[in-house]
Image: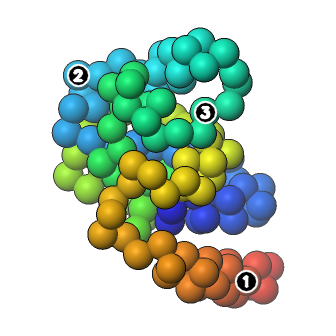
Amino acid sequence: MFASLVGSELTDLGLPVKGIVAHWCAEFAKPLFFARRGVRRRNNTSEVTSIHEWHKEDVIFGHVGLEFRLGGKRYHYDSNGLEKPTGILMEMPVYRGRMTIPELVALASTQDGWNEQFDRKCIPKLEQYIWASFKRVKSLD
């Protein structure tokens, strides 16, 4: 959820941003672009909207973050903050390949298959916090 909201705001600012996915099995899994092809082929659609569709392609969402370039440098960003890319996110290996922000938004909009401990009633407050933070950044221009 967090990555989809921040990723949308970064896209609105004109930054090229993509989603990164981490899980303990990521270093042995197929790259995300192969998994995406499998999901689309199985469903005969260009839309990928269910976390379960990705699970069938061995993509497990242990943690989701963002990757973007700024000033010629590449960065990773998640709920822990900004980091230089290391291939590890939240102590887990990152899958090869990247997700699009529209894919992250579509996946975040579904409740099924995600961490049950996350209280989705907090999403409006999280959106307000992110929106207010980016509003401050935009006002510095």
Q: Which mark is residue 135?
A: 1
Q: Quadrant of residue 137?
A: bottom right
Tell me what residue is drawn at x 69 percent, y 21 percent: 45
Front-most of residues 37 and 141? 37
Q: Nearer the viewer, mark 2 or mark 3?
A: 3
User: Which residue type does callout 3 highlight?
Assistant: Val
Tell me what residue is drawn at x 56 percent, y 85 percent: 125
Label 1: element kind:
helix
Q: Nearer the viewer, mark 1 or mark 3?
A: 3
User: Which residue type does callout 1 highlight?
Assistant: Lys
Task: Specify whether residue 65 is in view.
Answer: yes
Q: Position of residue 98 (x, y in %)?
A: 51, 35
**What's the CA distance linking mark 1 and mark 3?**
30 Å
Left/right of residue 130 with respect to residue 78 in the rendered view: right
Which badge, 1 or 3, is on the more N-terminal residue? Answer: 3
**What's the CA distance linking mark 2 and mark 3?**
22 Å
User: Which residue type does callout 2 highlight?
Assistant: Phe
Q: Which residue is mark 3?
A: 48
Label 2 environment density (alpha carbons within 10 Å; few <14, some 14–19, many ≥20): few
Q: Which residue is mark 2?
A: 28
Task: Specify whether residue 77 is in view.
Answer: no
Q: Nearer the viewer, mark 1 or mark 2?
A: 2
